[in-house]
Image: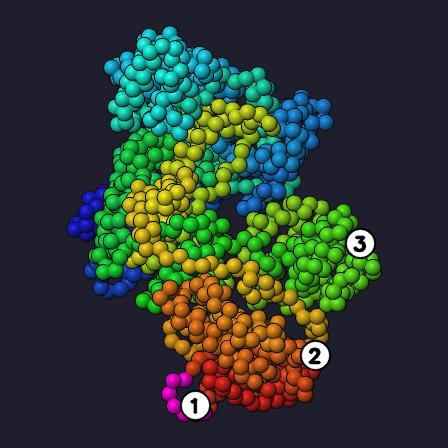
């Protein structure tokens, strides 16, 4: 049934054995979902009822896809001819068997697809709690919330409030508050974070036996013993004998030169130190003697480590002796250069924990042992009051509903009878509570008795440690099975996704990137080789793009250029930009928008980073907290007011304590503002005065929205996406308000921070932006991974850190020795126990970095681009090591040579160009703000525009059109439009050819940002400068840009309903002239190389006639009082002009 020609055919064939239980490693692109589908169909053709098979996935999307594939397979058997290619042929044959079984048993699956039990693990847990409401302790089924942060905060706040209750735990609350300097807000956040992860630590605190001080300190001593045994194994006797001789010598000398040195502990050390905790000082002394602070073998010896300079000797004989000792020691160190295992083991000793807790630590530990369960109890109360729970609670209650392994509940026994076959997808992302649930579901299952379990996953793609996923559970199941059920390990190896070039590069690189050996405790997963199914393509499969300066703009420009290059070569191919964290897109997204590259970005841009939301948040805080000076300054600087910095200083700079609103009421202060500033502030003062009079008479949402509308907020945004973002914020504000008040601005800010800007629904889906985590399971023709050199944010401290030290019988059910450490107090010294456990977590994180990188690169089908930045050393020829926690640090073994070669090439060929000070560029000083003449538009009533003769209009935004062919021409057009806007805003009387000529550096910078390559830069800059100069030299051009027109607008965004459809447009320039005529002008930056210029302009008028007619119709809807509208096309390079009139009818 399975194609025997592929290398992993035997494993795929074995996975379809309906009598066996298996754990399958399915690397990226290996057809995991197809295998699960085939297994499900194989079992479905043999069971008595479809409900006997349960397939578990982690996401609704995965469950829906699997269900769709099965239903589609069953529908495909109606076709007379079976597929000829695998794996479709095998799937079709299995579906035929199911169809026969379906007809024989009368299931009618086509009419009743709900009988197929394919569900998420959260859905499974919820169904278990519904079946046993008493044992699960739910009673009535609560709702499930995906954002329980407010509930965690409420429980934490109530826990801390117990400090004054006089209860038995009040002293514990007081201990915690004192330890963290009474920082209530910080402690509340720390407690809240602990509650979000309670499924990891609650099982430890539930066992009083484990929390005995003696046992916890035994675990610490066990860690020390492990470290000492490791270093002792790495140090053979001959080597140790020499080390001890040098150590005794050095210890005798440091007594006077460095009395606090750890080397002093080796003074009387004549034999191999022991491996018990009390021997640690001896080994630390040896480590200090041999290694630098950075953990490398020493290359120098001085008095600080017991080797004083010979010049300090009292006599010639002692001088000679010191010289010989130093030379012998350095020779010995040189011989140790290849002893990497010994070096690492000696260095690791420095990170071992102390063998016992201090009195202060233990007092805090006991307080936390009492407070954390109390916080969980407070959370249970909050759940009951709200009638909602989080997913963690559902999973824990589901486990409770099944009972213990020794005493299963009636539900567990019933399920044991009902479920004959379990299939689980993405098993590598299983958390401990989910693993225990799987153990409980398979209690009593044995090999060969008819019930089977198949778990599929890829430990190389385990990247959800922040969601409590524990890859060690997969590794444990691979070795030992699950519960009492043994699992046969199978490995798939064929990659059906990527071309051979990518597969070859991944094979070669990740052998170096991922660890060599498997280790359950640390989550170390070695690389598993893949075989390419698709042939090698001609162009380079993987390209590495090194950068050597901390300049995110340069990297962002390269990303835009790569997209444009790919679009030109393969216009319909799919492209993905994948990043580790959303912050890495800060420089890329604006450039994509400037380049006119539409993209889909789901949960990428934080809502709080969008200008319209920042302005609305400041407006909210200013309206409800008049003393918030920063928010008031933001409101006054926002586009609806747009005060200059000089005017802002008059209001706020002279009296740094006064409320801004009070200053706005002072007429003497207002008189000192500029004339335009007084005019702008007057309108704002009027709007706010009215709003403050009506405060608390309506909801905060209506108040904020009303002020925003009155100030002209919607007129300040560029497009409908910004309006949608504003709507999302206002909806959030409505939910945050309590009794028509905003009680907690911090909570409001945190709620905004958790939301993301809505995606552009009209964007082309062939270009997508997402995090690497979200891209898991997806594939794209071209993948671009920027920001590899950027480290992630540091993880925040936790109230309590924990880890389990594996013992001889370590497993999910048999806990290892527990390591616990409380948070260090304010101003306290670093705690070695806390730091040791933190280092264990960091080691797990480093291993996960390699796996995250693997997920990113294996999304690519045809092309892969990797972009990263490192610093160069002082010579400029060699690269420094990448930031330790960056993805580039993980990738470094595979790309180091490319970076070093690029660094050398840059040094040899670099031609540096004088930089442009952007502060002097007209663009940098340009701010967008409403005209002082702006007024709220009157409601539309009784006006209809006759547009019956207009052609059918597409709903998409009319984009700027450039006539010159190629990407560079479009970039030139974009920059020219921007500068025409600047000239119009400032007035052409302030511009001349001299100033245009001086724009060269700024134009180069703007063109570079657009993506113009170096080879075309000078020509592009000259073309842009020529267009701007010709516009200013031409009387028509100066008239269009003149500053004396009324109601002048540049790049004016309009929208409206025409013929029942929503139309949006951006008008290059519009104004009312002295005669009261409304002009709508469209710049055309193209040229005409042939003859008959007039004929060309006539054709252009015909070409753009309908577009400008639509502009006029929209303007008439916007300003129905306009009596006369004329339309114009302006060609600066041709000195060309075409105009015509437009008329409307009032019905």
Give how far across and how far down residue 109 sits, in percent.
Answer: 37, 55
Q: Magenta stretch?
A: 1088-1094
Give how far across and how far down residue 1109 sits, in percent.
Answer: 55, 84
Residue pictured at 27% horizontal, 25% vertical: 334
Q: Secondary structure at mark 3?
A: helix
Quadrant housing residue 190: top right
Mark closest to the chain's N terminus, 1 or 2: 2
Residue pictured at 46% horizontal, 85% vertical: 1134
Of 1052 and 29, the residue lying toward us: 1052
Looking at the image, residue 572 sits to the left or right of residue 392; the answer is left
Residue hosting label 1: 1093
Of 641 and 326, the residue lying toward us: 326
Q: Disc 3 and disc 1: Cα gap in Å?
A: 63 Å
Residue hosting label 2: 941
Visible residue check, residue 322: yes
> In the rendering, which numbered label is found on residue 662?
3
């Amino acid at each position: 049934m399975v194609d025997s020609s592929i290398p992993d055919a035997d494993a795929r064939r074995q996975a379809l054995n309906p009598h066996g239980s298996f754990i399958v490693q399915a690397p990226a692109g290996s057809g995991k979902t197809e295998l699960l589908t085939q297994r499900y169909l194989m079992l479905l053709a043999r069971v008595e009822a479809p409900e006997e098979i349960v397939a578990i996935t982690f996401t609704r999307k995965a469950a829906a896809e699997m269900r769709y594939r099965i239903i589609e397979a069953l529908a495909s058997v109606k076709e007379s001819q079976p597929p000829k290619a695998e794996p479709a042929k095998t799937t079709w044959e299995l579906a035929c068997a199911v169809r026969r079984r379906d007809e024989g048993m009368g299931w009618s699956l086509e009419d009743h697809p709900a009988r197929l039990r394919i569900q998420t693990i959260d859905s499974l847990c919820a169904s278990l709690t519904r079946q046993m409401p008493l044992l699960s302790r739910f009673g009535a089924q609560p709702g499930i919330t995906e954002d329980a942060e407010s509930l965690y905060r409420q429980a934490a706040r109530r826990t801390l409030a117990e400090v004054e209750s006089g209860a038995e735990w009040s002293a514990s609350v007081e201990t915690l508050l004192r330890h963290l300097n009474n920082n209530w807000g910080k402690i509340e956040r720390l407690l809240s974070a602990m509650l979000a992860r309670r499924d990891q630590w609650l099982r430890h605190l539930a066992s009083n036996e484990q929390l005995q001080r003696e046992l916890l300190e035994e675990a610490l001593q066990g860690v020390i013993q492990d470290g000492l045994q490791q270093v002792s194994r790495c140090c053979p006797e001959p080597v140790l004998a020499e080390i001890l001789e040098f150590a005794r010598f050095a210890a005798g000398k440091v007594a006077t030169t460095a009395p606090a040195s750890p080397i002093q502990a080796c003074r009387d050390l004549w034999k191999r130190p022991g491996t018990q905790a009390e021997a640690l000082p001896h080994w630390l002394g040896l480590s200090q003697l041999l290694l630098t602070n950075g953990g490398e073998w020493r290359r120098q010896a001085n008095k600080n480590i017991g080797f004083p300079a010979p010049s300090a000797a009292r006599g010639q004989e002692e001088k000679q002796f010191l010289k010989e000792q130093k030379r012998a020691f350095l020779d010995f160190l040189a011989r140790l250069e290849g002893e990497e295992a010994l070096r690492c083991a000696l260095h690791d000793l420095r990170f071992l924990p102390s063998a016992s807790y201090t009195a202060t630590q233990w007092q805090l530990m006991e307080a936390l042992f009492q407070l954390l369960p109390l916080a969980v109890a407070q959370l249970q109360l909050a759940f009951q009051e709200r009638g909602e729970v989080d997913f963690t609670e559902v999973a824990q209650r589901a486990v409770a509903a099944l009972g213990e392994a020794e005493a299963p509940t009636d539900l567990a026994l019933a399920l044991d009878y009902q479920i004959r076959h379990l299939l689980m997808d993405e098993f590598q992302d299983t958390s401990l509570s989910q693993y225990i649930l799987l153990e409980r579901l398979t209690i009593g299952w044995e090999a060969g008795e008819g019930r089977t379990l198949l778990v599929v996953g890829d430990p190389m793609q385990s990247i959800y440690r922040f969601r409590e996923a524990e890859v060690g559970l997969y590794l444990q199941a691979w070795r030992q099975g699950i519960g009492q059920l043994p699992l046969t390990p199978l490995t798939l190896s064929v990659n059906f996704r990527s071309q051979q070039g990518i597969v070859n590069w991944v094979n070669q690189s990740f052998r170096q990137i991922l660890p060599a050996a498997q280790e359950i405790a640390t989550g170390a997963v070695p690389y598993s080789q893949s075989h390419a199914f698709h042939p090698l393509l001609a162009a380079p499969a993987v390209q590495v793009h090194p950068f050597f300066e901390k300049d995110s703009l340069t990297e962002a420009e390269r990303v835009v250029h790569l997209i444009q290059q790919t679009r030109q070569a393969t216009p319909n191919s799919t492209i993905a930009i994948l990043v580790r964290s959303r912050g890495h897109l800060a420089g890329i997204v604006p450039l994509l928008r400037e380049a006119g590259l539409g993209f889909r970005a789901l949960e990428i841009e934080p809502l709080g980073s969008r200008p319209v939301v920042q302005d609305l948040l400041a407006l909210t805080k200013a309206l409800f907290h008049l003393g918030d000076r920063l928010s008031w300054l933001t409101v006054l600087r926002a586009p609806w007011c747009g005060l200059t910095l000089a005017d802002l200083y008059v209001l706020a700079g002279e009296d740094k304590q006064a409320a801004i609103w009070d200053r706005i009421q002072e007429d003497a202060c207002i008189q000192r503002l500029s004339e335009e500033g007084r005019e702008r502030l007057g309108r704002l003062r009027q709007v706010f005065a009215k709003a403050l009079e009506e405060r608390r008479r309506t909801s905060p949402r209506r108040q904020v929205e009303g002020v925003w509308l009155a100030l002209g907020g919607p007129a300040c945004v560029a497009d409908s996406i910004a309006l949608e973002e504003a709507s999302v914020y206002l909806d959030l504000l409505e939910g945050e308000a309590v009794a028509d008040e905003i009680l907690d601005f911090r909570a409001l800010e945190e709620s905004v921070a958790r939301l993301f800007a809505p995606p552009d629904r009209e964007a082309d889906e062939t270009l997508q932006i997402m995090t690497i985590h979200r891209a898991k399971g997806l594939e794209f023709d071209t993948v671009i991974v920027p920001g590899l050199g950027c480290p992630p944010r540091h993880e925040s401290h936790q109230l309590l850190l924990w880890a389990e030290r594996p013992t001889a019988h370590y497993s999910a059910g048999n806990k290892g020795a527990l390591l616990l450490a409380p948070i260090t107090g304010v101003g306290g010294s670093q705690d070695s126990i806390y730091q040791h456990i933190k280092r264990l977590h960091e080691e797990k994180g480093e291993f996960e970095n390699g796996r995250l990188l693997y997920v990113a690169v294996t999304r690519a089908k045809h092309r892969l681009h990797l972009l990263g930045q490192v610093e160069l050393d002082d010579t400029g020829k060699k690269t420094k090591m990448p930031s330790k926690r960056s993805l580039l640090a993980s990738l470094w073994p595979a790309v180091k040579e490319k970076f070093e070669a690029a660094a050398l090439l840059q040094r040899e060929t670099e031609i540096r160009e004088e930089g442009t000070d952007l502060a002097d560029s007209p663009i940098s000083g340009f701010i967008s703000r409403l005209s002082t003449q702006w007024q709220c538009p009157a409601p539309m009533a009784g006006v209809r525009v006759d547009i019956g003769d207009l052609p059918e209009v597409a709903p998409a935004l009319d984009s700027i059109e450039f006539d010159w062919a190629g990407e560079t021409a479009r970039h030139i057009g974009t920059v020219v439009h921007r500068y025409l806007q600047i000239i119009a805003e400032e007035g052409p009387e302030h511009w001349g050819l001299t100033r245009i000529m001086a724009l060269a550096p700024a134009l180069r910078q703007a063109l570079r940002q657009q993506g113009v390559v170096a080879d075309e830069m000078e020509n592009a800059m000259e073309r842009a400068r020529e267009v701007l100069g010709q516009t200013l030299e031409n009387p028509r051009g100066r008239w269009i840009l003149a500053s004396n027109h009324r109601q002048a607008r540049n790049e004016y965004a309009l929208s409206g309903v025409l013929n029942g459809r929503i139309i949006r447009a951006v008008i290059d320039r519009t104004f009312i002239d002295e005669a009261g005529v409304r002009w709508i002008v469209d710049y055309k930056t193209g040229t005409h190389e042939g003859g008959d210029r007039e004929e060309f302009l006539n054709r252009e008028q015909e070409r753009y006639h309908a577009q400008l007619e639509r502009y006029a119709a929209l303007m008439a809807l916007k300003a129905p009082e306009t009596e006369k509208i004329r339309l114009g096309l302006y060609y600066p390079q041709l000195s060309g002009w075409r105009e015509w009139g437009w008329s409307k009818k009032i019905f």
